C-alpha cells in the first residue's frame, strides 16, 4: 500500500477543525498529521510535519489563509494548498489562484468532496468549486489597485483618515485620493460602504 497523503488542517474554529480531522481520518489514504488554529502557525507546522497538502481556511487570526498560501508556495512548494472557506467570493478565488492555491471549495460541500479534492490536488490537478469558478468569470478582475485595497482594508472598522494615514505612512490627502478612487470604482457613497462592497466581492 502506498504512503498516505499527509494533511495539515488550519481552521480557527476548534469544533470545525476537529470534525474535519475526524472525518478525513476515516479515509484510508489520508492522514491528518497536524492541526493549527492560527494563520501564522501554518508554514512552520507544514515544515515540521512534512505535510504534502495544507487545507486552509481564509479568515484566521495571525495571518490570513491566502497570505499563508503564498508563503507556502515560496517556502514549502512541495506542500500544495486547498482552501476551504465559508466565503465563496469570486475575488477570493482570484487571490487564491494568484497565491498558487490548487484547490478551492466552500464549506457547504460534503466532506467526501474535500477528500476527493485532496486526492486530485495531490496528483497535480487543480480543483475549484464549479459555481464559484463561474461567478469569478462573471465578476471580472479586481478593479482596485494595491494601494486602494490597502486603504480600504484599513477603513473597514470605521477608522479615520488620520488613523489610516498613520498606519500606512501616507499623507492624509493621499489617503483621501485613494478612498475617492475606491468609492468611485465600487459605486458606493462613502468609505465604509466601499470597504463593505470590496469585502463582499473578495477584493480585500
Image (cartoon, rainbow, N blue to C red):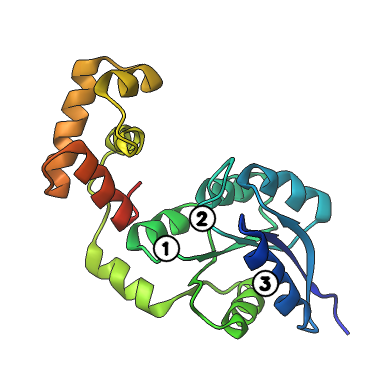
- Residue drawn at (77%, 83%) of the image: 26
10 Å neighbourhood of mark 3: few (<14), some, or many (≥20)? some
Where is residue 134 shown, x and y percent of the image?
Answer: 31, 75
- In the foreground, 74 or 114: 114
Q: Residue at point 24% right, 64% down?
A: 139
Q: Is mark 1 on a helix, strand or loop?
A: loop
In the rendered structure, are the residues bearing label 1 and label 2 in contact, judged by CB atoms less than 8 Å apart?
yes
Q: How many angstroms separate mark 1 from mark 3 (CA)?
A: 17 Å
How far separated are the C-alphas under marks 1 and 2? Answer: 8 Å
Q: Residues within 10 Å of mark 2 (few under 14, many from 20)?
A: many
Q: Is residue 127 left or right of residue 203?
A: right
Q: Which mark is residue 58?
A: 2
Q: Nearer the viewer, residue 177 or 51?
A: 177
Q: Earlier in the sequence, mark 1 or mark 3?
A: 3
Residue 31, percent from left and from top: 80, 72
Q: Are marks 1 and 3 in contact (CB under 8 Å)?
A: no
Q: Is residue 41 above or below residue 29?
A: above
The structure residue drawn at horizontal position 66% and vertical position 65%, both measured from the top left corner, is: 15
Question: Where is 124 relative to 198, above or below?
Answer: below
Cα–Cα span, label 3 and label 2: 16 Å
Q: Quadrant of the N terminus?
A: bottom right
Q: Name the residue under label 1.
A: 87
Number of callouts: 3
Q: In this view, does 114 lie to the left or right of 152?
A: right
The quarter holding residue 185 reads top left
x%, y% of residue 13?
61, 59
Q: Mark 3 points at which residue?
A: 20
Going from the N terminus, do you reach mark 3 or mark 2 first? 3
Relative image position of residue 136 (x, y in whole percent): 31, 66
Q: Which of 148 and 25 is in front in this view?
A: 25
Examine the rendered structure and indicate whether residue 168 appears above or below residue 65.
above
Q: How crowded is mark 1: few (under 14 residues within 10 Å), some or many (20 or more)?
A: some
Amino acid at each position: 500500500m502506498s504512503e498516505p497523503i499527509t494533511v495539515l488542517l488550519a481552521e480557527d474554529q476548534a469544533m470545525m477543525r476537529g470534525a474535519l480531522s475526524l472525518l478525513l481520518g476515516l479515509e484510508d489514504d489520508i492522514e491528518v498529521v497536524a492541526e493549527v488554529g492560527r494563520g501564522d502557525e501554518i508554514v512552520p507546522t507544514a515544515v515540521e510535519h512534512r505535510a504534502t497538502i495544507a487545507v486552509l481556511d481564509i479568515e484566521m487570526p495571525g495571518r490570513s489563509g491566502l497570505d499563508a498560501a503564498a508563503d507556502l508556495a515560496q517556502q514549502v512548494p512541495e506542500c500544495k494548498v486547498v482552501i476551504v472557506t465559508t466565503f465563496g467570493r469570486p475575488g477570493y478565488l482570484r487571490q487564491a489562484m494568484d497565491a498558487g492555491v490548487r484547490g478551492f471549495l466552500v464549506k457547504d460541500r460534503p466532506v467526501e468532496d474535500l477528500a476527493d479534492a485532496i486526492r486530485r490536488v495531490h496528483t497535480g490537478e487543480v480543483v475549484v468549486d464549479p459555481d464559484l469558478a463561474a461567478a469569478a468569470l462573471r465578476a471580472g478582475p479586481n478593479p482596485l489597485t494595491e494601494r486602494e485595497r490597502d486603504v480600504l482594508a484599513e477603513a473597514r472598522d470605521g477608522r479615520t483618515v488620520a488613523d489610516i494615514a498613520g498606519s500606512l505612512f501616507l499623507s492624509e490627502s493621499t489617503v483621501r485620493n485613494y478612498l475617492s478612487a475606491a468609492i468611485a470604482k465600487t459605486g458606493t457613497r462613502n468609505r465604509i460602504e466601499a470597504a463593505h462592497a470590496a469585502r463582499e466581492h473578495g477584493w480585500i
